[in-house]
């Protein structure tokens, strides 16, 4: 088992969920996972930040990268901000970190 020190700075274990800090870039040229910026993972989506389309695209992209149902990913902070906090259920922080590395 990996020690919490080995987790990327954008992942935090919070009870039985893993919290992901993300910096969302809407209207990007393509969807994708970017670099770590501070303690957030930059994530790009092509959707515009209108009527929460970018948030929906973010959750869809994360579900695909993490190979989990969209219902396991919840936006808990940053609904109208570029800085987002999401909770992910059903996967360990180590598995999440590994899937981001391979994305």
Image (cartoon, rainbow, N blue to C red):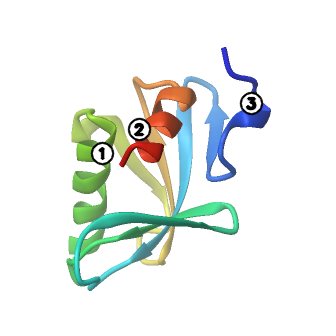
Q: CA distance from mark 2 to mark 3?
A: 17 Å
Secondary structure, mark 2, is: helix
Could you say which is closer to the camera, residue 60 or residue 6? 6
Dots 1, 3 in contact, CB < 8 A: no
Which label was assigned to residue 65?
Answer: 1
Q: Residue at x 23, y 64 (%)?
A: 57
Q: Determine which quarter of the picture holds residue 4.
A: top right
Q: Position of residue 48 (x, y in %)?
A: 23, 84
Q: Position of residue 63 (x, y in %)?
A: 27, 44
Q: CA distance from mark 2 to mark 1?
A: 7 Å
On the rendered image, what quadrant is the N terminus found in?
top right
Q: Residue at x 73, y 35 (%)?
A: 6
Q: Is residue 26 left or right of residue 10?
A: left
Point out the tag, 2 or 3, that comes first from the N-terminus.
Answer: 3
Q: Determine which quarter of the picture holds residue 59.
A: bottom left
Q: Is residue 50 left or right of residue 90?
A: left
What crowding class fits label 2: few (fewer than 14 Cα within 10 Å), some (14-19), or many (20 or more)?
Answer: few
Q: Residue at x 20, y 72 (%)?
A: 53
Q: Which residue is mark 3?
A: 4
Q: Residue furthest right?
A: 5
Which label was assigned to residue 99?
Answer: 2
Compared to residue 72, the image places residue 41 above or below, namely below
Q: CA distance from mark 1 to mark 3?
A: 22 Å
Q: Position of residue 15 (x, y in %)?
A: 63, 26
Compared to residue 46, the image places residue 36 above or below, namely above
Point out the tag, 2 or 1, that comes first from the N-terminus.
Answer: 1
Point out the tag, 1 or 3, that comes first from the N-terminus.
Answer: 3
């Amino acid at each position: 088992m990996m020690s919490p020190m080995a987790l990327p700075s954008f992942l935090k274990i919070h009870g039985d969920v893993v919290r992901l800090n993300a910096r969302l870039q809407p209207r990007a040229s393509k969807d994708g996972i970017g670099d770590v910026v501070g303690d957030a993972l930059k994530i790009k989506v092509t959707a515009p930040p209108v009527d929460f389309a970018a948030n929906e695209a973010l959750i869809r992209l994360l579900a695909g990268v993490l190979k989990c149902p969209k219902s396991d990913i919840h936006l808990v902070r940053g609904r109208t901000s570029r800085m987002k906090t999401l909770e992910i259920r059903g996967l360990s922080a180590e598995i999440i970190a590994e899937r981001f590395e391979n994305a």
